Amino acid sequence: MVETRERLRVGFVGSGFIAHFHLKSMVGVRNVDVTGVYSRSAEKRQRFADAVTEQGLGACRTHETLESLLEADDVDAIWILSPNDTRLDVMKALHAAKKAGRSKVFAVACEKPLARTVAEAREMVRLVEDAGLNHGYLENQVFCTPVLRGKEIIWRRAASTTGRPYLARAAEEHSGPHEPWFWQGERQGGGVLSDMMCHSVEVARHLLTAPGAPRNSLKVKAVNGTVANLKWTRPAYAEDLKSRFGAEVDYRNRPSEDFARGTIELEDEDGNQLMIEATTSWAYVGAGLRIQLELLGPEYSMEFNSLATGLKVFMSRAVTGSEGEDLVEKQNAEQGLMPVLEDEAGIYGYTDENRHMVESFRTGETPIETFHDGLAVVEMLMGLYMSSELGRTIRFPEPELEDYVPVVARPR
């Protein structure tokens, strides 16, 4: 029996940077209350609960254990937003609680990437389906406002008359992650390719997919990847990471890649060849996070650059103050001509993503992004890592991807 609710009561696993981004976006979502939070830090849990109250999103209880959150009477759905190396354990705990009849949770959404390896991602899918849970994969760029509007226009006005799009380019770059675990290959599952190309390959695949068609209507035929260490292995920058994040982030001896490039060949239902070009970097220094998207077809093109904003401000040298990210995410300066994203949660897709997930779970519908899509993304990422290690194109299906672990994620 499909469970439905007039209002969805959500519990958060994780209370860090991305959890607060999701929380900020929930202000623009109807029929939802944030009723619980669990994370390892009592201080961060309380700060998160206070933010829920301040934003009028419900009465949020803090939970000292994961089991307490999963078994709470006032939680219908779980948002998994904890570090990559914890997500499978969270899913195992939810599965166990459901099978034992201790949890009333009936839906779960997981932040990108779904897992660190194909084997982990496949187990996430098995567990969520065996537990009978509705499930969503939180890929915000699919829900970016320019992506939603741009895809609708291209497919309605252009592709309908001159033919489907055949090339999608996606790039995402910034100056480096906020938390130490992102920089640790074993915990994160890789470097920038794992962290950011998960966005790029899925938003590109989404743009190339016909409206209403399942994502797997496009078949991955081959992938070719390149990774590099361009900035953070240089002695001064490696020392900077160590001073900020501690000895566990050792880019002199244990780096993860800070640059990645990938090409993915796909085939549509009619046998047409399609291509994705993706580039990601932790070595970009500009105003802040830059997302660049392009879609090309027989007689048309579309492009979006997140830093080409309509709103800009200028501040001279006489304007001084503390460092922050109040103008744009990963902001790198406080002076000069600065782009401003007036609604980051909306433009980046978090608001529409969470609106879609809440309504899907609340009404018993299947989201357009599920754990199956998360698994498909991890398969592409692992193919790109394998290609970069072996120095050759990887053709799909590739059975050895099942147990493949990127070089930077292997045990010391």
Image (cartoon, rainbow, N blue to C red):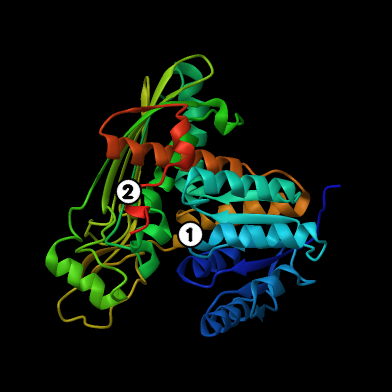
Image point 66% across, 68% down: which residue?
Answer: 11
**Residue 353 falls left or right of residue 286:** right
- Residue at the disc numbered 1: 84
Write down the quadrant of residue 261 in the picture: top left
- Can see residue 306? yes
**Residue 89 falls left or right of residue 360:** left
Write down the quadrant of residue 328 in the picture: bottom left
Q: CA distance from mark 1 to mark 2?
A: 17 Å
Q: Residue 98 location, x and y as percent?
A: 77, 59
Disc 1 element = helix
Disc 2: CA contacts within 10 A as few (<14), some (14-19) or many (>=20): some
Disc 1: CA contacts within 10 A as few (<14), some (14-19) or many (>=20): many
Q: Residue 50 location, x and y as percent?
A: 59, 83
Disc 2 element = helix
Picture layout, residue 176 above or below residue 165: below
- Can see residue 291? no
- Residue at the disc numbered 2: 407
Image point 21% across, 52% down: which residue?
Answer: 229
Q: Residue 154 location, x and y as percent?
A: 46, 30
Q: Residue 158 location, x and y as percent?
A: 45, 24
